[in-house]
Amino acid sequence: MPASSPPTVRGRCDYTASMNLTFYGAAGEVTGSCYLLQTDRARVLIDFGMHQGGREEYQRNFHPLPFPGSSLNCVLLTHAHIDHVGRMPLLPGMAFGGPIYATEATCDLAGIMLRDSARLQVSDAERINRRLAQEGRPAISPLYTVEDAERVLTLFKPVRYGNSVDVAPGVRARWFDAGHMLGSASIEITVTEKGKTTVLVMSGDIGHKGSAILRDPQAPPRADHIVMESTYGDRDHRSMDETVDQFTSLVKEAVWDKEKVIVPAFAVGRCQQLIYHLHKMRHTERVPVFPVYVDSPMAAKAFQVYRQHQELYDQEATSATRPGHGIFDLEGLEIIESADESRRLNGSFGAGVIIAPSGMCTGGRILHHLKHNLWRKGVHILIVGFQAANTIGRRLVEGADAVRIMGTTVVVRAKVHTLNGFSAHGGRSELLDWADAIKPAGNAQPRFILTHGETTPRQALAKSIQDRFRTQAKLPKWGDVIELD
Ligand SMILES: [Zn+2]
């Protein structure tokens, strides 16, 4: 798996004459978030996420960053999704000794994500090595191990939303709730050098208003530069009410027809929101009790973290939480931890919902459920999140007649539904409104840099920004350096 040759670094990455930002991921794509902020006196890394998608994208995780970890003062983390946190276990091996600042819930969730990711890296490498041994070829090393993940987790330092923290010489940071997953944040970074103050806002992933459990995104108050995600920069989602209505009628139809609903979903975040909606549906609609399986040991741990951080719930989730009865206490819910129990679900049964990761069908138990069910008429496949290019999820959304799953071609006879309204990302109007709430830090209008979006949505958002704010957004590529003076 180590890559043959690293990608070309297009910009300079080793000068510190002025304040600048270098893009080491999520530049023209939606995964691999990683940005290096350099000032006269400090070097700060923001996020260090995994590249995801197909084999080519995954290989890029093996490309070393062109500087030693020991040159960094700290790492700032926006949230615990693997495309923002997934390369963190490489840091100790790069001679980085910490600290890594993140909200408390992000620290907790990152522990779950990174341990799981490390186990996956090791088991994937073992599987590949069995094949290589048969072919008489040398073994490969995993991207990182569970020990690497444990080492990096000791470097995490929890911060509170709204508190200003001195993170490096001349650099202060504040975290604002981004409403995207529990603990998610946009980070306001204030740099003071030579008597001049510059405010940089890193949006992280901006949530979708009205998302279950979470508060709506809160924009930092001011900025000179805004680095903003653009995942859905070319479209708006349906409203949450409309989406919940669609979800309810689909589940009711499947229960009535005694059919399965299979939902690929992230074990952390989306899964909890779907259970919240099913729980609410049970109380507001006359739907009989039906089995709901969450097929993921990681999701079981995530439920614990969500229960521990009720202080982060929005008003609706707070008022739905009562002593002895929480928002996830759904009748009929079974969380499947063992592989044997998971396999039991492959046999046919009547009505029921199976929620399993990975959310983009790039691996995990969802592949088994798709393999055993995609070819069955009557089964519903429900796509509730963004599907990156070159994933099985994207092919299903695009209406493929058949897909390759674990070496087998499976025809698609199940009904595939896409409910983008459950997206954890804001749509175009929400992104623009979020940015509109940020006032200029100095005399000039904030300048925009767009990341975390494929080409079409990123360009579309740049056009919308031009129309609304009369300013031209920058669209950096991998390795580009943007001056922030
Ligand atoms: Zn995210």
Image: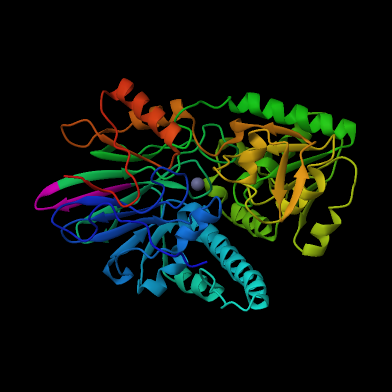
Q: Position of residue 114 (x, y in %)?
A: 54, 63
Looking at the image, what colour scheme do you see? rainbow
Pick the front one: 175 or 415:
415
Question: Residue visible at 32% across and 56% down?
Answer: 8
Q: Is residue 472 left or right of residue 135?
A: left
- Looking at the image, is 360 positioned above or below residue 247? below
Residue occupying the point 82% across, 58% down:
343
- Residue 80 can be seen in this image: no
Residue 173 within the segment the image draws in magenta? no
Looking at the image, how many numbered discs can be counted on the residues?
A: 0
Q: Main secondary structure of the magenta part?
A: strand
Eyeballing the image, is 205 above or below 124? above
Name the foreground residue: 226 vs 141.
141
The x and y percentages for residue 461 are: 39, 29
Extreme top residue here?
467
- Look at 71% across and 37% down and name the residue there: 382
Q: Nearer the viewer, residue 462 or 485?
A: 462
Q: Residue furthest front?
A: 135
Q: Which residues are magenta?
A: 188-196
Q: Position of residue 4 (x, y in %)?
A: 44, 65
Q: As rendered, which of 76 and 383 lies closer to the eye?
A: 383
Q: Quadrant of residue 422?
A: top right
**In this image, 261 relative to 269: left or right?**
right
Residue 192 among magenta residues: yes
The quarter of the picture where the C terminus appears is top left
Q: Position of residue 141 (x, y in %)?
A: 53, 74
Q: Residue furthest left?
A: 194
> Is residue 184 visible to us here?
yes
